[in-house]
Image: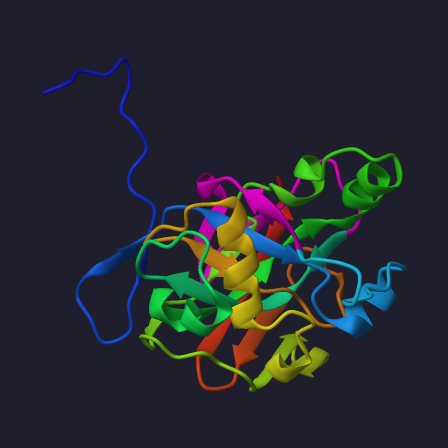
Amino acid sequence: MPQYLFNPPAVAALPIQGKSELFPVNRLFFVGRNYHAHAVEMGKPVDKSVERPFYFTKSIGTLTPSGSTVPYPSETNNYHFEMELVVAIGRAGFRVAAADAHELIYGYAAGLDMTRRDLQLVARDKGRPWDLGKDIEQGSVCSEIVPMPFTVIERGAVELTVNGATKQKSDVDKLIWNIREIIEDLSRFYHLQAGDLIYTGTPEGVGAVVSGDQLEGRVEGVGSVSLTIGAAA
């Protein structure tokens, strides 16, 4: 058996609805600006006829289970929520045709892509990577995985409330690039693996939170995700 200088991190995993086994998480992929109204909200409209999806990743250590209380992160004054449908990949695939994309799907979850918006926008406007704005400790929140093998979700309400007030409300059918198109395109760049999670994008209505706020999100037919913002780190 190998000996390590210090204990390696535990396997990142999420509960699976109705099962005792855990879903081991491999990588976290995020689709940027995948709802028209949000793209306009961010000042960057998308023309699907001439553009492809774009992606960013987050460290596996940012994965945080639903129901957690997380500290308000350091070095930001504009911490934002982004409510998303998450696709859980259940088998490997590379250069997958859209027509075959369902074969890779194990299930779905509800997720939050938490963002230091002030740092993200500075990086974006200067042409720098988004890491400090996006790759935030405890900033990739996810519910339990709901098994829906080979199922492609094409519609369903996506909603988020903060302290009971609705902030985001849209539908999966408003995705610019749908789930089949995302899997087809992303698999051109990566050998997708079982355990990969794809956060499919957020609708309009993103906004700032403060310590003490209670976030509750829901994806119709999948489930809900919750988060409490704690005191500053």
Q: Quadrant of the N terminus?
A: top left
Residue closest to the eye, 47 or 14: 47
Identify the residue shown where x is 44% and y is 57%: 197
Residue closest to the eye, 137 or 52: 52
Provide residue 213's location: percent of width, then percent of height: 65, 64
Q: How many marks?
A: 0
Identify the residue shown where x is 46% and y is 73%: 99
Q: Residue furthest left?
A: 1
Provide residue 24's location: percent of width, then percent of height: 29, 51
Q: Residue furthest top?
A: 5
Residue closest to the eye, 15 or 197: 197
> What residue range appears in magenta?
54-78
* 58 lies above or below 81: above
Residue closest to the eye, 160 or 164: 160
* Image quadrant in which you'd find residue 52: bottom right
| In this rendering, position of residue 103 left or right of residue 64 | left
Provide residue 205's location: percent of width, then percent of height: 77, 72
Question: Is residue 170 at all visible to an observer of this figure?
Answer: yes
Identify the residue shown where x is 75% and y is 66%: 206
Question: Is residue 210 at all visible to an observer of this figure?
Answer: no
| In this rendering, position of residue 145 left or right of residue 232 | left
Q: How is the image coloured?
A: rainbow
Identify the residue shown where x is 73% and y is 61%: 33
80 inside magenta stretch: no
Q: Quadrant of the C terminus?
A: top right
Provide residue 17's location: percent of width, then percent of height: 29, 74
* 33 lies above or below 123: below
